[in-house]
Image (cartoon, grey):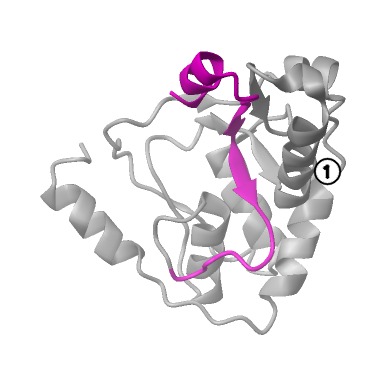
Amino acid sequence: MCLLIGRAYGIPTVALRFFNVYGTRQALSNPYTGVLAIFASRLLNNRPPLIFEDGLQQRDFVSVYDIAQGCRLALEVPEAAGRVFNLGSGDHYTIKELADRMAAVMDKKGIEPEITGKYRMGDIRHCFADISQARAILGYQPRISFEQGLGELVAWLEGQEAEDRVAEASAELSARGLTV
């Protein structure tokens, strides 16, 4: 819609698709925030991360710093106008792998994720970014590796408190018929 209005009125407009953004200062007690924050909240409360489906679905996780870089480039590069760009890391990980890595770096290796086998309506099996156009036109290059970003997130988590509200969110999804 923005691109349409931009074209119609001669307003330079860029559309950005953010993939799974993570970083410090995420809302840990909001069950609708990103999966890394949700898993962190569960682990901080010594509870297992809950994984939908079989845990083998894949996602692209991108540092908030790389998202900020992509936004800046979209504003500064004139050739960006009228285009859509995917902003992600270009890498992908399974949700099960993510839960295992979070537990390991948070020193909670004894807490195994719980794979529910349930499916959330509207979820897609795999979702990762093709960032080739952002690289070619914007000069976008993710700079924060997943390991580096995860390390920074975990360092920030030390001393944080999180209210685990996953049960409430799960009940709401179920009541609305959004989990099978």
For the question of whether residue 134 can be seen, the reply is yes
Q: Is residue 102 above or below residue 43?
A: above
- Out of 173 and 18, give the one closest to the viewer: 18
Q: Residue 10: say if magenta.
A: yes
- In which image quadrant can residue 15 be found? top right
Q: Is residue 60 above or below residue 151?
A: above
Judge from the rendering whether residue 89 lies leftward or rightward of residue 129; answer left or right. right
Count numbered badges in the picture. 1
Q: Is residue 180 above or below residue 34?
A: above
Under circle 1, the secondary element is loop
Judge from the rendering whether residue 129 lies leftward or rightward of residue 175; answer left or right. right
Residue at the disc numbered 1 = 145
Q: Position of residue 131 (x, y in %)?
A: 72, 21
Q: Is residue 90 above or below residue 165?
A: above
Q: Position of residue 11 (x, y in %)?
A: 60, 25
For the question of whether residue 131 can be seen, the reply is no
Q: Quadrant of the C terminus?
A: top left
Q: Residue 41: say if magenta.
A: no
Residue drawn at 87 percent across, 25 percent down: 139
Q: Position of residue 48 (x, y in %)?
A: 46, 62
Q: Position of residue 102 (x, y in %)?
A: 65, 57
Q: How busy is the neighbourhood of tag 1: few (under 14 within 10 Å), some, or many (20 plus)?
A: some
The stretch in magenta equals 1-29
- Out of 91 and 101, give the one closest to the viewer: 91
Residue drawn at 51 percent across, 51 percent down: 35
For the view shown, which residue lies furthest in the front direction? 9
- In which image quadrant can residue 154 be found? bottom right
